Image: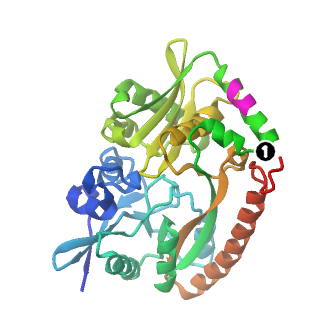
Amino acid sequence: MPEAELFPSVSEIPEADWDICACPETVDGARPYDPFTTHRFLALLEASGSVGPGTGWQPRPLVLRDAGQVIAVAPTYVKSHSQGEYIFDHGWAEALERAGGRYYPKLQVAVPFTPVTGRRLLARSGHEAAGRIGLLGALRALAANSGLSSAHLTFCTAEESNLGVAAGYLPRVTTQYHWHNRGYTRYSDFLDDLSSRKRKALRRERAEAQAFGGEMVALTGAEILPEHWAAMWDFYQHTGERKWGRPYLSRAFFEAAMALNRDVLLVLARREGRWVAGALNFIGREALFGRYWGAIEVHPSLHFELCYHQAIDWAIAHGLARVEAGAQGEHKLARGYLPAAVHSLHWIADPAFRRAVANYLAQERADAAHEIAELSAQGPFRRDDGSN
């Protein structure tokens, strides 16, 4: 019978044990499908103080062993708030507390501050069934035995969602916008796939952005230097202060981020000898993941160019299947990003509250399906009959 254990830090788990479950595809030196669940990424969040004491994200990585061998792991946190998750349950917390209950602390399986779909039940090859089912059971037991209100797996895969439903979790579906490579070999192929009006609009938008008076560069691996990370911190901090009040990632994260260079694409804009804007992307085996954007100067359409158009350019040039541009934003639709379902799982300890949440989620799933169908029909692509 597999045995579960919570650790106080991912750094206390050998990197080889973690990554053989999180990214077994990298044993041949290839890229991970999901760079965010690698040991190096999660360990940097901890080492930089972006998670841990005082952040409301207390690391408690979960390890499942069978006969002494690690067969599955999960990036698990005890949360004292609902910030930095992008799957919003603030209303649930308020409702339970109005009824005299206590929502926090809760158990969260997630990559902090990262609204990217990926495996959350990370199992060693050959142990997938036992590992995933074992983790789901262990999370429920840990939450119940510790007096926690709930356990949540956010941005999990559709397959994991189905497993969770069978294990008594409530499924949730929300929406993001993703760009898909339909066999394009160059950006002009993508433009040719759009309606005439949208194609002209994107050309105008790109021309406007590229007339900002400087140059744009795309950097990855050894091309990324400390000065580039320092500039990205300035952009990130500026955006974070404007949007969130306090940036989630610490300065120490950016100062140590050279350790992640192999997983990163920076798209930066320089004018008159200084970096003025940039977008931070992570590179997966099949996808490019847009994460953060910021600027210290305002230029028309520069945001769209660095975050969306340059990402599509790079993905096509490197044979990637899709670009995931982060949370929210119907403005992405006009730029070739179509709505996609995002899955989460939720286990609620209180039976009455669980029924109320289940009813809410049933309606939300229906609304999400309708929204995805409606917005997909409004997409910028030419119709099947070839009309514009």
Please name whichever residue, 271 or 150, is drawn nearer the observer in this view of the structure.
271
Give how far across and how far down residue 224 sits, in percent. 38, 29
Please name whichever residue, 133 or 363, is drawn nearer the observer in this view of the structure.
133
Q: Any magenta on residue 206? A: yes
Please name whichever residue, 377 or 327, is drawn nearer the observer in this view of the structure.
377
Q: Which residue corresponds to the image point at 67% horizontal and 78% vertical from the top-left?
A: 362
Q: Which residue corresponds to the image point at 57% horizontal and 78% vertical from the top-left?
A: 100
Give how far across and how far down residue 203 sits, in percent. 72, 31
Please name whichever residue, 180 or 170, is drawn nearer the observer in this view of the structure.
180
Q: Amino acid at mark 1?
A: Ser
Residue receiving disc 1:
195
Instruction: Classify residue 362 as left or right of residue 20.
Output: right
Q: Which residue corresponds to the image point at 41% horizontal and 55% vertical from the top-left?
A: 34
Instruction: Classify residue 177 as left or right of residue 221.
Output: right
Q: Is residue 72 above or below residue 88?
A: below
Quadrant of residue 303 in the image? top right
Q: Is residue 287 above or below residue 252?
A: below
Magenta span: 203-207
